[in-house]
Image: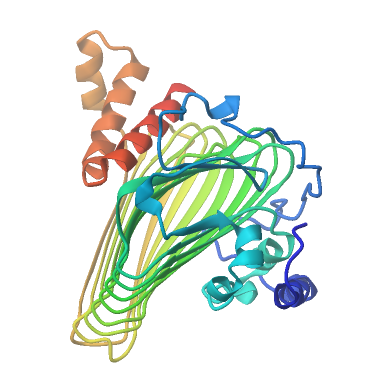
Amino acid sequence: MIKQQTWLDELRQQAIQEYSVLPLPKADKTQIKNWEFEALKLNENTQKIEKGIPTSISHLVNLKDENVIIIQDGVVVYQKLSVNFEGVIISSIQEAITHHEAQVKPYFGKVIPFQTNRLTALNLHYMNSGLFINIPKNKVIEQTLTVFFIQEKQSLMNHNLIVMNQGSQLKYIENYISQKNAIINLNTEVVIGENAQLDLATMAHLNSETVVYECKKTKIERNGRLVGSQGALSDGNVINENLVSLVGSGASAELKTVAISKHTQKQNLTIEIEHLAPYTEGNIVNHGISIDEAQLTFNGIGKIQRGMHGSNAQQSSRAMILSEGARADANPVLLIDEYDVKAGHAAGVGKIDEEQLYYLMSRGLSRREAETLIIHGFLMPFINEIKNEAIQNELMKLIQKKLETR
């Protein structure tokens, strides 16, 4: 376990004392009571980890690439940043708490309090990995920062903190990769200041024997903006919560998720935007595929509190079922407590079009080739809406890899 300052020691101790009375995350239509979220494997010796680009991801990054950070079992094993990142604080969460306490303490554990649920409390207490990013006021970074979090020797209890100060801008891709069966618990706290913008993409491709809980929560101040893209492409069972609070007038968030569930996998994805200031905008777009005997659930939630006039909450969730035993659910929820607003939702779940399959197979394609082509056609309008080319390319690679292992 990471040795921390006194204030964090006390917070972590409080988290473990209270976690047993806290509820599990809410996962509509998915029974998670027997999932082994607490079967942790920790305190492995990570001091002998070799520095450099691990062979397991050498196909994803090479020495010529700039603005890359690799964290393996909590240890920064590789970092290469261009001069564009001068003045930016980027460090492991351990180093940040030790050397940048004044920048960390006001936010750490405030966006996602450990009392949120039992698993956020476990994450805080057993935290063994993570990254701190602090972008200074009015610092605009055009280049994309790519970070790889690799689990190899122990359960991954990862906790990130991203602080975008007033007027700053950043494009950021985080990748989660597991080498062995493990419990994966990921918490990311994001603060976007006034007039700041963060393009944040999360790509997860974790082992089929992993059990994953991910909670990402973002607080957005006046005229701040989040453009979020998420590739839920892991092979194990997943509970994912992507939550946004629009706390400043003119704040906005656009959250897009693409998910593929296969075999007997269960994925339950909650995407929520809460409007806590007037003239705020939230847009949720989800596209997913369920194959074999898998289960995929989208929970889209838009909340507009009383007095938050002029706000706009929109969402769309669509899922395709490719097998008789597969299941997909799209649950749109709008909780509106104000009259002078705009709000709307669309949801659809359907099977693959047999006429399209027949047409493609009559042209010489096998059934699997035809299905793959239809899947790409279903997902491409979603992918094309992602304006960041680096994020778009990474997502397409992961989708192709997931489909190839069917």
Q: For residue 242, what is the image quadrant?
A: bottom left
Q: Is residue 44 left or right of residue 61?
A: right
- Residue 326 vs residue 296, the one in the foreground: 296
**Residue 356 visible (yes or no):** yes
Q: Give the tally of numbered discs.
A: 0
- Residue 123 vs residue 50, the one in the foreground: 50
Which color scheme did the rendering employ for the protein? Answer: rainbow
Residue at 77% x, 42% y is 47
Q: State the residue lying farthest toward the top.
A: 364
Above or below, 145 relative to 275: above
- Residue 225 vs residue 132, the one in the foreground: 132
Q: Is residue 63 left or right of residue 31?
A: left
Residue at 32% x, 34% y is 393
Above or below, 45 relative to 8: above
Which percent across, then down, holds residue 141?
Answer: 31, 54
Which percent across, then down, holds residue 366?
Answer: 33, 12
Residue at 31% x, 33% y is 352
Above or below, 238 relative to 308: above
- Residue 343 vs residue 17, the one in the foreground: 17
Which percent across, then down, holds residue 274?
Answer: 37, 75
Q: Is residue 267 left or right of residue 48?
A: left
Which percent across, then down, holds residue 27?
Answer: 54, 61
Q: For residue 158, what is the image quadrant?
A: bottom right
Quadrant where the N terminus sits is bottom right
**Residue 257 visible (yes or no):** no
Residue at 62% x, 65% y is 99
